[in-house]
Amino acid sequence: MTFANQEYRNIFLLFIQDTRKFWISSLATACYLTFFALVFMVLPVVAENRVVSAESIQEQLAKSVQGSQDNVAQTNLRRFYAQRNYQPVWTLADHATLQDTALMLIKRADEEGLSSNDYRIESLRQRRDETPDQVSLAFELDLTRSLLALAHDLRSGRLVASLADPDWHIPQQQFDPVMFLQQAVTSGKLEEAFADLPPGIPQYRSLKQLLLKFRALMATGIVWARIPEGASSIHPRTSHAFIPLIRQRIQEAYRIFERPEYDVADSDSEFYDDQLEGAVKVFQRQYGLNADGIIGKNTRQALDMTPDEHIRQLRISLERLRWLPRKLGNRYILVNIAGFYLVAVQDNARVFGMRIVVGRDYRSTPSFNSRISHLVLNPYWNIPTSIARKDLLPKQRNNPGYFASEGIRVFSDYQYESELDPDSIDWYSVNHFPYVLRQDPGRKNALGTIKFMFPNPFSIYLHDTPSKYLFQKDIRAFSSGCIRLEKPLQLAEFVLGKSFERADIAERIRSGKTQTVNLSERVPVYLLYLTAWSNGQGEVYFSSDVYGRDRRALAYARW
């Protein structure tokens, strides 16, 4: 291009220079904008995936204090790292094996009746798999947070016992997960340390093993046979259309429990034969029912329990066992309120068991622990005012001779010195019951011949009973809160130990005199509520949720 006029030429050159400056400036601006956009997008990822250091951990924990509520989990996390000068644990270059162990422990939470999802197992795995060569700061902190929570839950229970079950009065164990995890990491024996956290009693191990079987069964998608509601009971050696279904259900029980009695022959016959009757009786015993072989409402309900319902019972029972002290004693007594059963344990082995009767649903027996201090032979029954007013007063009104026929005497106060003539009292005008009743020792005494005393705020004790027929009932909730014993002399022999002399105790009882026998060594007693429980020999039993405490606790836990 040529220019005739030098002035035009100069103007063109200026235009070219300005245009080039404009494009250079625009390109620079675009580059700058792109650069900063990438910086803001990448920096969080870099910050999260940068090599974890003490400075980055301390900085992150300081931010979390400002940005979140100061809850227990966050406090424990800060304590853990503060004690080690904020040095990382899981993200060191040579700690890949330690990461594997930690993730494996969290996955195993399912085996304990807990849920690995509550400890972020999938999130943790995803974080590590995304950046296997440079694990993030978030992974470091989240893994520690999960292990601290898991350690606490295995040792003391995941739930707050008093909130999940307000009728539970055994102190929940205190445990410091920070100190535990610090020591476990330092020792280099992380897996062994976590293995020692759950209860070591046979009860817990048996329930845990059965839970694994049920969860494996659920994973296959198998649905168990259900027995339709029937109007009448099914008796042995009769025919019924439901018999093939019942036989199938017993066969399903065999695959889980492996009891030889459940290995019944496969048949479409509707006849209730002897082999099936034997299996049903064993099944009834396992589910806390009277083993008569008659398939009635309660037996059908037990047969219809699904695998998922079994799992829920096992999970909440394992949780209740985690609430217990780890050292129960060398000799102790477990009273299972829900199972209507008592077990004596010595050196971690079952010595014997017996049936019991517990409180009615409106006078339910609470869960607590104490120590048996003494026995009372031929005891008086100092009748609680509530029982006198609600239960006995109506009987006296209907039969003016009731108190006298039952050996019940009336007093003005608890000194039992001023006795009153029941015939001189207008029982129809009595409202607040200003009297005190006491039943004399004898064959009609509600406490029988022996009562076992242990201090507690509920005025509850173990005792004999003249009403032996009640032990044959399926649901044995008939008392006013105290525990009635099927074999009181056998329990007396256990708690008295070497000082027990059967002939001497029997002679004292025959004398009819009220006597106190002190124990040289107090024996621990634990009153529990377990709808899934073990006899200590590997066999697991189930019972109905008679007080609804499982239902309430499971709703609280959202299991």
Image (cartoon, grey):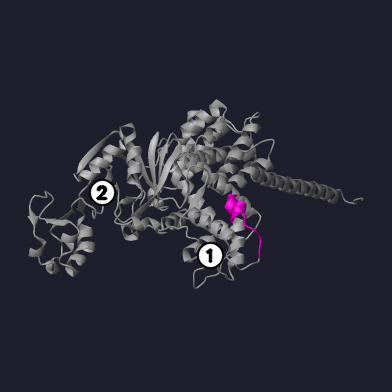
Q: Is residue 72 visible?
A: yes
**428 vs 421: above or below:** below
Residue 88 can be seen, yes or no: no
Write down the region rendered in magenta.
253-267
Write the residue at 43% across / 36% down: 326
SS category of the residue bearing label 1: loop
Residue nearer the viewer, 38 or 79: 79
* Residue 222 locus on image (x, y percent): 64, 58
Q: Return the residue at label 1.
A: 236
| Magenta-colored stretch includes residue 260 | yes
Q: Residues within 10 Å of mark 2 (few under 14, many from 20)?
A: few
Q: At label 2, which amino acid type do we have?
A: Ser
Q: Is residue 301 above or below residue 104?
A: below
Name the residue at the top extreme.
187
Indicate yes or no whether the magenta region holds residue 428.
no
Residue at 29% across, 56% down: 480
Q: In the rendered structure, which amino acid carries the disc numbered 1?
A: Pro
* Residue 104 on image: x %, y %: 61, 39
The residue wearing badge 2 is: 459
Please report whichever mark, 2 or 1, sits nearer to the chain's N-terminal start. Answer: 1
The residues tagged by marks 2 and 1 sit, at their Cα atoms, a distance apart of 44 Å
Say whether residue 380 is left or right of residue 95.
left
For this orientation, the residue located farthest to the right is 2
Left or right: 361 with respect to 242? Answer: left
The residue carrying pointer 1 sits among few (fewer than 14), some (14 to 19) or many (20 or more) residues within 10 Å by Cα, namely many
